[in-house]
Amino acid sequence: MKEKVDMREETLGILELLRPVAPADLIRVGRNYDGGYVFSSQSLANCRHFISCGLSYDWSFEIELKERRPDLPIVAFDRTSGFNSTMLYWVLKNFGKIALYPFRFLGVQDTPAQSWGKISMMLRMKQIFSGNLQFVKKHIGLESNSGVQSFGALLEHSSGYGVKLDVEGTEYELLDTIIDKLDRIELLLIEFHNVEENIDAIVPFLKATRATHYVQHVHGNNYDSVNSFGFLNSIELTIAKKDSGYQPESAEVLTYPVKDLDFPNDRRKPDVGFDFTEQGRK
């Protein structure tokens, strides 16, 4: 019985750290389903630079970010992205689909129009990544080398950064750097993978951010399974710097996903949400 009580107390503590304070001006940037992110339009307006880490083959977030803030310098990093590597990855991964469903090879859930949209996006890569939106074919890490860009070095010379981190587990290597540079970060969009296995890193990180930053939004990635805490084992968090618009007493969004803002990453399966109501905590 004690073990069950301790587990419940731990779960409630984690949920309290994840509980968002939802501003009234939340927007979604990027496509519906996998690839979009939710955050405050004011937090975006406060950004003076944006670093996007982890693209794969979906650049809808970066494209819309550029459209919304054409003045904002945006640099995107991913060593596995780019036209040639992305096409090779798709062909190897989806050879059977290409043979059987040539219009749907970019993802079994995509319609032909969506598939052609992704092809068009790849063909326009040089046009898309131009001006204030630049692409660097490197991974993000602690120290720079021929294939890796030091994350800390990117935050050395200014402030007002927006950061997107979808780096398939590397986020845990970068948490100390984020804490060290937290005063320079205006908006952080981070996906935590393998949450249950890394909860001992996530909890101290969230506690360390609470003095100056707050959780604006949370969403579970339903490509993953539900963990023993009762939510999906990969979660997408929006963490923003507290500013004059921060009003914790006005947070009225207590259940997630949020209609018209959140969509399941995998559209073939239902979303698994969060319930921060008193009833949900019982």
Image: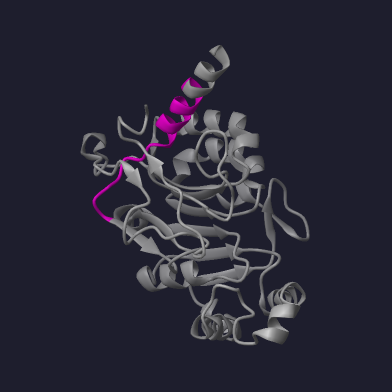
Residue 214 lies left or right of residue 1; in this view the side is left
In the foreground, 271 or 242: 271
Q: Residue at x 31, y 40 (%)?
A: 21
Q: For the N terminus, which image quadrant? A: top right
In the foreground, 46 or 12: 12
Rendering coords of residue 160 (x, y %): 42, 50
Residue 156 visible? The answer is: no
In the rendered image, the vertical position of residue 154 relative to residue 209, given as above or below: below
Rendering coords of residue 26 (x, y %): 30, 55
Number of marks present in the image shown:
0
Quarter location, residue 66: bottom left
Quarter location, residue 125: bottom right
Q: Residue at x 53, y 36 (%)?
A: 179
In the rendered image, the vertical position of residue 260 relative to residue 220, given as above or below: below
Q: Residue at x 49, y 85 (%)?
A: 113
Residue 197 visible? The answer is: yes
Q: For the C terminus, which image quadrant? A: top left
Rendering coords of residue 159 (x, y %): 45, 48
In the foreground, 144 or 176: 176
Magenta range is: 9-25
Q: Is residue 15 magenta?
A: yes
